Image (cartoon, rainbow, N blue to C red):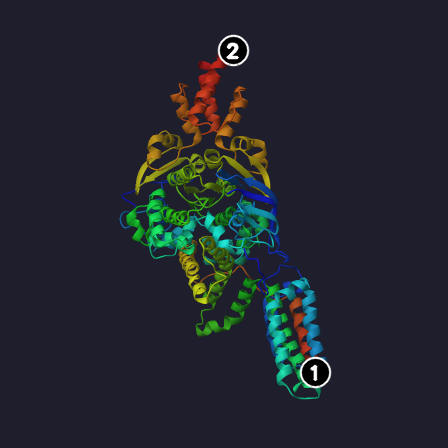
Amino acid sequence: MDITFNHVSYIYQANTPFAHKAIDDLSFHIPSGSFTAVVGHTGSGKSTLIQHLNGLIRPSDGEVSIGDYRLTNNAKPADMKELRSRVGVVFQYPEHQLFEETVKKDIAFGPENFGVASEEIDKRISRITADVGLNEEQLERSPFDLSGGQMRRVAIAGVLAVQPEVLVLDEPTAGLDPRGQHEMMEMFHNLHEQQRLTTILVTHSMEDAVRYADHVIILNNGTKYMEGKPEDVLSRKEALQRVQLDVPEMVQFLDAFEKKFGKKIPFRRQSAAAIASEIRDRLREGDRYE
Amino acid sequence: MLKNCSFSIHENEAVAIIGHNGSGKSTIAKLMNGLLFPQEGEILINGQPVNAETVWDIRKDVGMVFQNPDNQFVGTTVQDDIAFGMENRGIPRDEMVKRIAQTLDAVGMQDYRLTEPHKLSGGQKQRVAIASVLAIFPKVLILDEATAMLDPKGRKEIMNTVTMVQEQRHLSLITITHDLQEVVQAERVIVMNKGKVWDEATPRGIFARKGELRSIGLDVPFVAILSEELRKAGVPIMNEVLDQDELLEELWTSHSTM
Amino acid sequence: MNNGLIIGQYVPGESLVHRLDPRTKITVIFFFVFIVFLANSVVSYSVLTLFALASTFTTRIPIYYILKGLTPVWFLIVFTFILHLIVTNEGNVLINIIGFKIYSGGVIQGFAISMRFFLLILVTSLLTLTTTPIEITDAIEDMLHPLKKVRFPVHELALMMSISLRFIPTLMQETDKISKAQASRGVDFRTGPLKERIKAVVPLLVPLFVSAFKRAEELAMAMEARGYQGGEGRSKLRELKLEKRDFIIFALFIAVVITLFATRNY
């Protein structure tokens, strides 16, 4: 499903002394089947943006469209539940939403609410359990007996079991250790590749945006600061630093390399190995011509 | 959780403890502060064993900042939170007011003295937590994954704050972390794996064991990975590098001899 | 984030009312609640209304905001008025609609009672609008101090209150977060039969309790690490001090009380 924001603004606690504009005149387009990273500081409007995607909130101004669903200040889809079954949201620290007695029941909770038949749910669970890296034996255990990382996988399985077309991820790796973070991102990447899920990743990690996304939106103070291909957006070092965002380490290094050796190696999201051989070649060729 | 761990940390030293989740890092922190007591063996702080009798004295010397910024903020405003530890120790009001001003200065939060916690960012809350510890004039500051729940901006704030504090006050700093930047800043690194001390060396020494580090679920810095790839590609990198400047320097040397 | 309004939520400010000692405010309001019931004439009501409105304007909080905050209460005030119109049958008949009579006594009575109600709520909401909850806690701790002699846990009570206050915004954010997460999983908190709606609360309550317990545990550990050993031997940062303005307000209030007594029955 295509997602479009058309001049969207959102104000919290409008008409009170506490009124606060979280999103201001925001427009962008996310094509169906893309992997989009939304990057910005805490308070840049990312979580407000997410809540529009499945109709948890409606814009104060402007229009959000998700496939055929339209959200404006005074119009919402007739069947909100249907929208929510098609847009799955994995919130930050999703393990906090677990509540059932067993892992299996918790995963089944979403699909049950959306009216999926129980044999179909069972089928989905056994498939998804493997996808998220849980084992069958854990299905009958209480989710509260699992480790933090495993609980998060259960919560994610609960969202995937609804079989959404759009998957929204709000900092899915927060609080995990390096291996856990890597495994988690690889898992989402595989899901995206295999099922062509439209994936929207909200993240602080420039490295993840570089590695996984094919489209990047950078938010600053509730407005769109930059948008485009990761290699274009994330290589603009000065522009990123102006809003105090990190620059991917590779971009930083290539920039410093250029300053020191006077040789430019363009950033194309290449691997460390590719960069290494480019550096070697550039250094050797320099010798030849000097 | 922990098996037969021995190590010592010196005065004024900055040590990082790393390890995957569940490797026993946080247990170590709690043992140092008397929040847990060892079932076997002994912990000495400043020559004093940690036990039920000494624990309140130990806690004066060993201050701790925890992971979740929300769950350690006791006061209803910033100054109340900093006062909490001092109030517990019966420090007179005038002295408290003085120290609140000093420590807020030290962590760069002087403009937030009367702010309520829910109006602060995670990084700001953690800076307040550091200030509250400093107000007691501890000899040891333990950061138990204090940056794990913060965004990059908050993480930077905390790292700058800690560097500033270390310059101003002489204390031992123990950072328990996953963050490579924090590891690189330490003088010495203790790597934990499955409840045991896996290695104990300088950051350079630790990152020289890249492959093994990854196999126990830890990360290595981008420059270390790149220098490894460069070697594979036939560019001689002689020394282990920790940051970009060092790597560029190495490249410069190998370039002029190439 | 909550989109709605909370009745009497603190609005920061620097007005005279804001700066008064919370004990002064609590005492004045406490007695005001009593004397409202003593008013029985146009003049005495006017005296009280004047006092209440003067206090309200002194806070410099926008009137529309205060009135909006009272929205849920307006219904009660109007209801009270109508109730008195119907049940009172004193005085002259003003309107007679097919045997259903409204008496002048009912109008007066209804007006008086509604006014009383309005004044009560207005003045008490001024306390919470201009006083931070922690100041109220401090004042209560101070005013309950004598009870320490009978082993009443005043310190513990005050600490409990202040920690609750500290965590209310945190827990509200958490409630909002979890209810949104569950709504995304297809829970409908708003519509459907009552039984279904009660069932919908479980996925909200369980995570909230789990998290509250975890927070409590971590907080207790953090407090211990920071040397908390109970109320014994603690010093205090917050000090309450009566200023000149507090005495002036007391004097003024006593004047109001005297005027009220003097103008009763007029």
Q: What is the secondary structure assignment of the residue under circle 2?
A: helix
Q: Does the CB distance between marks 1 and 2 fall below 8 Å?
A: no
- In this view, the residue in front, C78 or C251, is C78
Q: Amino acid at mark 2?
A: Tyr
* Chain containing mark 2: A
Query: Where residue C94 is drawn, which disc sits there?
Result: none
Q: Residue at x 59, y 36 (%)?
A: A242
Q: What is the C-alpha distance between the residues marked 1 and 2?
A: 105 Å
**Residue linked to disc 1:** C41
Q: Is residue B81 above or below residue C114?
A: above
* Residue B114 location (% of width, % of height): 57, 54
Q: Is residue C178 above or below residue B143?
A: below
* Residue A243 location (% of width, % of height): 58, 38
**Residue linked to disc 2:** A289
* Residue C12 location (% of width, % of height): 62, 59
Instruction: Please give left or right for residue B191 compared with residue B77 in the image.
Output: left
* Residue B205 location (% of width, % of height): 37, 30
Instruction: Please give left or right for residue B42 compared with residue C136 in the image.
Output: left
The answer to whether residue A263 of the structure is visible from this angle is: yes
Q: Amino acid at mark 1?
A: Ser
* Chain containing mark 1: C
Q: Is residue A266 above or below residue A12?
A: above
